[in-house]
Image: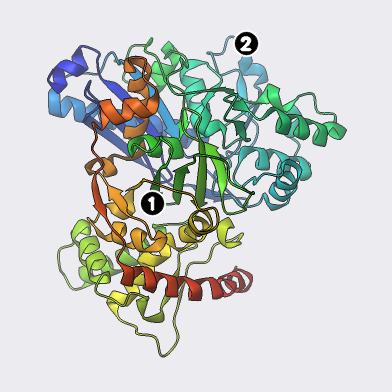
């Protein structure tokens, strides 16, 4: 079929992902190829010390993103989207969205609208849950990160927040949007594993940990048990509900989209990243590098012991994954590139941002392998892996360092993946984890070869990048939506390997030994100077 025939016959599949700075929609055809896109730019806000997005911003962003997709379809193919084969919703993982009775609006409210948000949405970026995460990690003998939903819930209990007794439902951003579109309180197992650990054997929340949490908070006499609050945990390929009439109107305010199409389980951006890079099979992995960064390595067996730097989550079909998550990645280097853009504009020279990035990134590769001693810390927000509760971006050098543009840019590129290296060194050097293929995707890899070469040096491993790397998580969730209706009885790993990617593993770059040695030298100084970044949070508020 032509793209127009695919759309008008209702065969197109839609994936929408809520990233940290952009909401993106991707429409794919029956061969899983993107045929149209839409987007909406947005930013989190810091209110009362909490990183958040308002519900108004969420729904306006969804509608505007879809409207942009619809406009592009109209322009490219001169047709309307009226019927979709399936839909998938994805969003940044973890965080905290507690709901309770809506009171007045509950009678006669649309499905999923009878409960209201009791506290502002707390995103993965918040690091105010240290006490809760530490206590739960000890209780469970399992690393519980600051950003996980259970950490936020328990921190709210420790802080005696008034809304806690009234909670009737707790979910993530992806789960919230899916619920409002379908009325179903479900969550894909990958995203669910960032609420509280799941058991890869039962494909459900870890029953022992749920019981321990209930016992821990029993003294508060809440009218709920944890299992009553959590969304139903389901795997890729399972039915997750259908688009309601109310949901269709929320998505397409023009009224052209008809209800009734199925939705796949809502997933987190980590899960969609694994799908988009064909990294759900054991001994494969991927690195997502954008506003935040994270590596996902699908394990053959559990790790020997818990580590504060490594989170244990799952693939969208329930396999165990070691995740190293960093709150900061490209935001600070983007700010520096914009500074050079301003300088170029001052000179009256026309600016093409892609060209500015390409020139600066490629020039960085001409610098010293150890950046000439220069250090760059990209901590826009707190960075748990580095032990920082607050962020202070910093550039550090001594008088004798080799300070030039190439080393400056190279240091900033190294800084984007430096914290990621700290966690992965544990996996590869201490746990001896074996990986056959690691694939990179996200903004860091948009300039061909550069981010790939830097990451290969950082973790001393070959890195592949596919042509589809720029499609990102919106394409990944579209693939999961397509898998729901077209899986032919195959498991997810085989479906991706044979149907979607057909053996394509992308372009691989091997680590350069000189770069590896240089990065190792850089990282030793980097680790030694992290206390300077900590001191900066105390001195400059």
Q: Position of residue 525 (x, y in %)?
A: 49, 76
Label 2: which secondary element: loop
Measured along the vertical axis of the image, is residue 148 above or below residue 108? Answer: below
State left or right for residue 159 relative to residue 15.
right
Say which residue label 2 marks.
107
Q: How is the image coloured?
A: rainbow
Q: Where is residue 251 in the image (x, y as percent from the top left)?
A: 38, 23
Label 1: which secondary element: strand
State left or right for residue 260 relative to residue 49.
left
Q: Where does the C terminus fall, quadrant-wise?
A: bottom right
Identify which residue, 388 or 320, lies in the foreground.
320
Q: Which mark is residue 289?
A: 1
Residue sitting at 48 percent across and 55 percent down?
428
Identify which residue, 384 or 245, lies in the foreground.
384
- Badge 1 crowding class, 10 Å Cα cut-off, few under 14, some 14 to 19, many 20 or more, is many
- Badge 2 crowding class, 10 Å Cα cut-off, few under 14, some 14 to 19, many 20 or more, is few
Q: Where is residue 95 in the image (x, y as percent from the top left)?
A: 57, 40
Identify which residue, 245 or 387, lies in the foreground.
387
Q: Can residue 1 be seen in this view?
A: yes
Residue sitting at 28 percent across and 44 percent down?
469
Q: Where does the N terminus fall, quadrant-wise?
A: top left
Q: Which mark is residue 36?
A: none
Residue lying farthest bottom? Answer: 400
């Amino acid at each position: 079929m032509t793209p127009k025939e695919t759309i008008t016959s209702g065969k197109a599949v839609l994936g929408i992902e809520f990233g940290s700075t952009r909401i993106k929609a991707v429409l794919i055809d029956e061969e899983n190829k993107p045929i149209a896109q839409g987007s909406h730019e947005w930013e989190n806000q810091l209110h009362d010390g909490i990183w958040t997005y308002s519900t108004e911003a969420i729904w306006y962003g969804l509608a505007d993103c879809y409207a942009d997709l619809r406009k592009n379809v109209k322009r490219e193919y001169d047709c309307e989207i009226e019927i979709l084969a399936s839909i998938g919703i994805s969003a940044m993982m973890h965080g905290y969205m507690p709901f309770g009775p809506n009171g007045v609006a509950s009678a006669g409210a649309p499905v999923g609208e009878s409960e209201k948000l009791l506290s502002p949405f707390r995103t993965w970026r918040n690091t105010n849950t240290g006490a809760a995460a530490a206590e739960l990690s000890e209780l469970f003998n399992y690393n519980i990160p600051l950003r996980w939903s259970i950490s936020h819930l328990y921190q709210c209990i420790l802080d005696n927040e008034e809304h806690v007794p009234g909670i009737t439902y707790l979910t993530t951003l992806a789960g919230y949007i899916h619920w409002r579109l379908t009325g179903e309180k479900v969550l894909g197992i990958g995203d669910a594993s960032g609420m509280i650990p799941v058991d890869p054997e039962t494909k459900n929340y870890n029953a022992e940990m749920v019981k321990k949490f209930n016992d821990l908070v029993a003294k508060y006499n809440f009218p709920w048990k944890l299992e009553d609050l959590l969304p139903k945990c389901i795997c890729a390929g399972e039915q997750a509900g259908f688009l309601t009439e109310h949901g269709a109107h929320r998505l397409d305010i023009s009224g052209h989209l008809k209800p009734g199409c199925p939705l796949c389980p809502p997933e987190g951006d980590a899960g969609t990243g694994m799908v988009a890079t064909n990294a759900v099979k054991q001994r494969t992995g991927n690195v997502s590098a954008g506003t935040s960064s994270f590596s996902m390595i699908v394990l053959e067996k559990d790790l020997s012991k818990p580590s504060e730097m490594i989170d244990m989550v799952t693939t969208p079909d329930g396999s165990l994954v070691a995740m190293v998550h960093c709150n900061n990645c490209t935001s600070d280097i983007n700010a520096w590139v914009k500074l050079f853009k301003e300088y170029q504009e001052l000179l009256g020279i026309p600016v093409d941002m892609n060209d500015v990035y390409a020139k600066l990134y490629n020039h960085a590769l001409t610098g010293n392998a150890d950046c000439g001693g220069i250090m760059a810390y990209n901590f826009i927000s707190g960075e748990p892996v580095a032990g920082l509760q607050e962020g202070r971006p910093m550039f550090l050098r001594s008088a004798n360092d080799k300070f030039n543009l190439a080393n400056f840019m190279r240091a900033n590129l190294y800084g984007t993946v430096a914290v990621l290296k700290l966690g992965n060194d544990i996996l590869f050097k201490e746990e001896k984890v074996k990986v056959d293929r690691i694939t990179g995707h996200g903004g860091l890899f948009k300039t061909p070869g550069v981010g790939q070469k830097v990451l290969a040096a950082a973790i001393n491993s070959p890195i592949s990048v596919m042509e589809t790397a720029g499609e990102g998580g919106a394409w990944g969730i579209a693939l999961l939506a397509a898998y729901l209706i077209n899986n032919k009885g195959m498991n997810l790993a085989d479906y991706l390997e044979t149907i979607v990617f057909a053996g394509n593993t992308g372009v691989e770059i091997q680590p350069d030994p000189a770069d590896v040695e240089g990065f190792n030298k850089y990282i030793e100084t980097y680790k030694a100077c992290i206390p300077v970044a900590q001191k900066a949070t105390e001195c400059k508020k």
